[in-house]
Amino acid sequence: MNFKLKVWRQKGPNVAGQFVDYEARDIPADASFLEMLDIVNEGLIKRNEDQIAFDSDCREGICGMCSLVINGIAHGPGKAKTSCQLYMRRFKDGDTIWVEPFRAITFPVVRDLCTNRSALDRMIEAGGYITARTGSAPEANSIPIGKVVADLAMEAAACIGCGACVAACPNSSAMLFVSAKVSHLGLLPQGQPERTSRVVSMVRKMDELGFGNCTNHYECEAVCPSEISASFISRLNRDYARAATRQAAVLV
Amino acid sequence: MATTLDAKIPTGPLEEKWQKHKNESKLVSPANKRKLDVIVVGSGLAGGSAAATLGELGYNVRCFCYQDSPRRAHSIAAQGGINAAKNYQNDGDSVYRLFYDTIKGGDFRSREGNVYRLAEVSVNIIDQCVAQGVPFAREYGGLLANRSFGGAQVSRTFYARGQTGQQLLLGAYQALSRQIAAGSVKMYPRTEMLELVVVEGQAKGIITRDLLTGKIQAHAGDTVVLASGGYGNAFYLSTNAKGCNVTAAYRAYKRGAFFANPCYTQIHPTCIPVAGSYQSKLTLMSESLRNDGRVWVPKQKGDKRPPDQIPEAERDYYLERKYPSYGNLAPRDIASRAAKEACDTGRGVGPGGLGVYLDFADAIKRFGEKTIRERYGNLFDMYHNITGENAYKAPMRIYPAVHYTMGGLWVDYNLMSNLPGLHVLGEANFSDHGANRLGASALMQGLADGYFVIPYTLGNYLATQMGKKVSVDRPEFKAAEQETRARIERFLSIRGKRTVADFHRELGLLLWEKCGMARDAAGLKEALQRIPELRQEFWEDVNVLGGGEEFNQALEYAGRVADFLEFAELMCLDALERDESCGGHFRVEYQTEDGEALRNDDDFCHVAAWQYAGPDSRPIRNVEPLIFENVKLAQRSYK
Amino acid sequence: MPAVTVSPVPARRFSPNPLVAFYQSSIGKKWVVALTGIVLIVYVLGHLAGNLQIYLGQDRINNYAEFLHNLGPLLWLIRLFLLACFVIHIVATIQLTIQNRQAKPQKYAVPGYQASTPASRTMIVSGLIVLCFVIYHLLQFTLELTHPGYRHLHDSLGRHDVYHMMIIAFRHLFISLFYVLGLFLLCTHLSHGFASVTQTLGINNRKIARVISAGGVTLAWLVFLGYVSIPLTILLGLVR
């Protein structure tokens, strides 16, 4: 298969970028999108041109490192998959494909298609954990957790932290990411003691970092590789108001 | 001169060794912990849990990973589960049984003391993870669920859907994040360790490259903890992440740490076959597929008919034929080798003839498509997404792929290398799995090392290091920094004709052929001849563009492949020297009449720990004898 | 392609007072938007119920208008409350929109929307045009500044003749068309707004999400039909 690529090239964080046209020739239909880029890159190196920088690691859809926007869609067309799990047979021979980095002020471009998503780590550091000193844990079966709650927590915990939700959101909001962690930990009995402080701190950090606000477009849910439901955002909204009321009540 | 190594296993009864050791280990006072700098390389299950726990204890920790976030380490990809001797199922499990299964699974090539400790702390891991909020699968009553995994006779595997590795890693990552916020751990993402610094015979620091800016920096510490994973990517194609590499471990080896059993590699039988030379990685599908799928190839050599046109009588269900009692559930190494044999005799299926069928037609007939969809729907979807084929209609094609490496840097009972001050955890060390790792044991070992072993044993070294801080101004650091820079300069100045990937592919293919599932002396000798040539070609003809002081993925890759090109030789040498078959190391010369691995306990019941002897000298093979006081060495049989 | 460099993330300040901080937070502001949105939705529904009385004849609707006028200070309280909600709703959404634009300084070269709707993406535009519409609407019917003649319309009982005021107003094709346009945008706004309120207030969940979203859209267009029926029936001469 042959494709025309329009790829965002940008030398570094503080310089201008632009789209550059490339031809991807003789691409096997069974190649993944990233393997197609590998092939293009090998061609570039042979012509002594700088390869296109893009992030990837596990290439099986779980590490969350790959982060392309393909034809305007975070992780490209198709449901519930990362960029690395997109295969070229999904495209038509001769297609023109636009490839861009995740765009958000909170995800500055590092080079070409790579962005710095450490803002996601900052939000976890702000409270996305349960304080459980190693060695002090009680016997695992001492607190039963109903299967329904445990399953729901697992659904929220499935987030791979790729940031596609932020990339897809017209407002670059990180609400789906934050809601997944707040729900995962807030649903479990182990997460109750820090439930109030967690949601307040994580949302505060999200705001401070400059993420946008959720205006309920649900683009995040549509591109999420882990199919995190936007209903967790509803839960977050509820949890945040509950926490804010509690904090206000303490002061009164 | 080859030496015999002492693992410093505590004396006394097996069950009391760890407790005794903990009682006798040195402690560091809280006031002193603050003054001690610990460098942790890697942020997976082992490194992440160690960094978090050591930070919590009060040490000054710096943690490094090449990914853009510690949460992305490749531990995340483990699907199956984590073993623990909780005996929640009341089915007769115990610490001893987990210990024995692990020793036997490792084909009697691991240490009794270490493995027993692993089984012992396995129960604490589950407690710890549940407290952190890891959402393990549960029964309706709210208690933890278990499943049986990898042919074990008891149900001791805890799991979180098909994402156990991810959930355990997130638990460690969140604990680590808490310490980062508290200031006890400083995290360096997108930073790669390129050199180990040894000062007066002790590991005292590392040289790193900031992958974003290319800045080379020296870090001095009171001890270095390596948790940098395995070396499966030496084979180019493996189930490892693209970035997994041997560099940190190999650099440590070149600085004097011994590399143990590099020939022990695990090949996983149920992976999606290679589709073409462009392929960048192999994808593993859960072994559970073999519970309902039947493995077969055509009886006729070169039979190109589509599977549904091959009549039942012309199919060879070779696992069922060879291993009537275990059938399709034969252990990983046996199933993998059998697939290779079938393909070697020209009966492989699919493009290139490197594949065998895993057929669900009978299971679908018996249980209905709905049941099969419920059990394996996500795997069938994954298979369909990658290959474009519908496994409900036609059989899946599978082929073995490199998956895990049991070898690694040699460590003693304290997880300290022969090089004082260098500690090695997780897949990067060699200690617990012997010649073959059981399913759901990798996660257990990583977390055991990080949460429950190193926090106790690190004190034994650090207590002796008070007031012995070194500065990065010392000549050892300057020299290491200089070497690192020179190496980068060299990569960038070659400007040859071949890409790094090109060399990596060639090396991988060579290793897969000569040092893969089945090895023989002749092939290994060929490889040992070819690898140095290939290495020389690399250094003459590789093309690495761009600069050193910028984000340069080609340069990162070049450094990793250069180390694989050296390490591969060590792997083949170890495979050649180990004149026996055991676990994942199968030498065709040593097999029973039935084609099973034939161990040589008289001559090889030991660990081979390789010592670097200079660029042009053959490395020295040191030995640590394995002493079995509690179990009897037996022949594995799965007939 | 325009040059893009990293612009610094605008600093956001937060008050130590939890109530102020709640408003300053992303979610808090959305709560305020949603709560004021509910008030405005209730008003829109109530206003519609009032207007539809035109079909019950001159007496009923004029009587209703008279009743409202006789509320006196209470009417002004209600008006002030509505005005406050309206202003807060607008101020908060403008603040949110500014932050949202800052958060995404560069859009994608080819838009690849998967789930959002034109309605959801144009809330600020539809909202601001509705604001203009409302101002004109108040000038026309409440303050009667654009059409001072409306003040002199009285029925046989001496009440302000709202019935004929509406008929006279909507006989003008352009006024009617402007109304239809304003209501179209209002209901577009509501078609996203109804369901959005439940999401923001945390009432939404997976089981009812589809129902709420479809219900919101249906309700919005029923409101549209209800309102628009009046100028249409007047234009067509069905109400005279």
Image: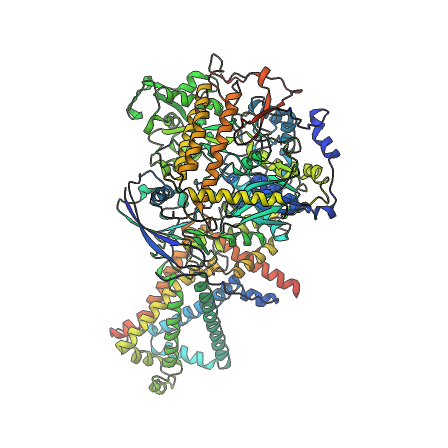
Relative side of B142 to B564, left or right: right
The location of residue B529, given as percent across then percent down, is: 44, 25
Identify the image quadrant of the N terminus of chain B. Answer: top right
Residue C58: which quarter of the image? bottom left
The location of residue A229, given as percent across then percent down, is: 46, 50
Number of numbered discs on residues: 0
Residue A204, relative to residue B398: is it above or below? below
User: Quick one: B238 or B633, which is closer to the camera?
Assistant: B238
Query: Please, which colouring scheme is shown?
Result: rainbow
The location of residue C232, given as percent across then percent down, is: 28, 71
User: Quick one: C44 or B543, which is closer to the camera?
Assistant: B543
* Whether residue B38 can be seen here: yes
In the rendered image, the residue lying farthest to the left is C236
User: Quick one: C205 or B354, which is closer to the camera?
Assistant: B354
* Whether residue B281 can be seen here: no
The location of residue A26, given as percent across then percent down, is: 28, 40
Relative side of B129 to B558, left or right: right
In the rendered image, the residue lying farthest to the top is B593
Relative side of C58 to B18, left or right: left
